[in-house]
């Protein structure tokens, strides 16, 4: 006898996976556009889930769920890679190793030099992944309350800087939170003049949370002055 609950679960899973089905005819311009969109979504999802698993911030029960989700993304990417290989073969192009996996383990680094008032400054960055040399992916683990608006402004600035540093068309900010996975497209590039302005600006830290994550905080006068100011305000009340 069939189990109705199992049938409903299968239908629900099929509904969730339907997005990744490429419906355009193979090797048409529409196919490649649709394929890239769905591949990028699955690829970013895999990176996000891997990063969440490695963060060790999830419970044992959640870990099993995310590992199962990672396996689903692997299957989706295998399906999409198979479609791509079929389309390439129709063009007379055959992959030398169809089982080669994309490496998302190592981040990509780059640096540029800018001159400000006669001094050279090296701007260096390290992004989580780059697709097709033009699309960046930066994954953020965020445990903030669900009502905090995303994306966070300093992350947007970071993504704009990556677009400039790596010559990217856009960068996807992917937030892995206890409330879900959210992604935001940042297509603007920071300009070199804006980089010079940031270097010239003396305000540091620019954000209140920076001192908590700065390795130089124990040696810096800024946290000390902040504590002294807060103590002075408290004593005057």
Image (cartoon, helix red, strand yellow):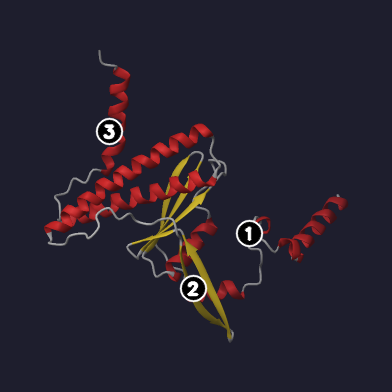
Mark linked to residue 111: 2
Q: Dot 3 corresponds to which residue?
A: 14
N-terminal of the pair, mark 1 or mark 2, is 2
Q: CA distance from mark 1 to mark 3?
A: 44 Å
Query: Please, what secondary structure does the residue beneath circle 3 have?
Result: helix
**Within-10-Å neighbours for mark 3: few <14, some 14–19, many 20+:** few
Q: Residue furthest top?
A: 1
Q: CA distance from mark 3 to mark 2?
A: 44 Å
Horizontally, residue 143 falls left or right of residue 171, namely right
Q: Which quadrant of the structure image shows residue 128? A: bottom left
Residue 190 in the image: above or below residue 82: below
Residues marked 1 and 2 touching at CB (< 8 Å)? no
Residue 19 image point, x, y percent: 28, 42
Q: Quadrant of the N terminus?
A: top left
What's the residue at 29%, 38% (across, down)?
17
What's the residue at 53%, 46% (across, down)?
55
Q: Nearer the viewer, residue 24 or 51?
A: 51
N-terminal of the pair, mark 3 or mark 2, is 3
Mark linked to residue 48: none
The mark lying in front, picked from 1 and 2, is: 2
Mark linked to residue 207: 1
What's the residue at 56%, 78% (across, down)?
121
């Amino acid at each position: 006898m069939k189990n109705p609950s199992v049938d409903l679960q299968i239908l629900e899973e099929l509904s969730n996976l339907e997005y990744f089905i490429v419906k355009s005819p193979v090797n048409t311009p529409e196919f490649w556009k649709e394929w890239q969109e769905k591949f990028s979504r699955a690829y970013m999802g895999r990176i996000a889930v891997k990063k969440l698993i490695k963060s060790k911030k999830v419970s044992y029960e959640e870990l099993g769920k995310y590992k199962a989700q990672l396996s689903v993304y692997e299957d989706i990417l295998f399906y999409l890679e198979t479609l791509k290989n079929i389309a390439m073969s129709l063009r007379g192009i055959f992959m030398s190793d169809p089982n080669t996996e994309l490496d998302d383990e190592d981040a990509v680094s780059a640096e540029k030099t800018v001159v400000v008032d006669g001094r050279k400054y090296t701007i260096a960055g390290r992004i989580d992944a780059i697709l097709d040399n033009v699309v960046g992916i930066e994954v953020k683990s965020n445990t903030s309350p669900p009502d905090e608006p995303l994306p966070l402004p300093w992350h947007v600035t970071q993504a704009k800087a990556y677009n400039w540093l790596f010559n990217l068309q856009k960068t996807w900010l992917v937030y892995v939170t206890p409330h879900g996975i959210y992604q935001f497209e940042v297509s603007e590039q920071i300009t070199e003049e804006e980089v010079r302005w940031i270097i010239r600006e003396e305000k540091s830290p620019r954000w209140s949370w920076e001192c908590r994550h700065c390795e130089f905080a124990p040696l810096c006068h800024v946290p000390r002055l902040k504590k002294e100011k807060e103590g002075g305000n408290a004593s005057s009340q």
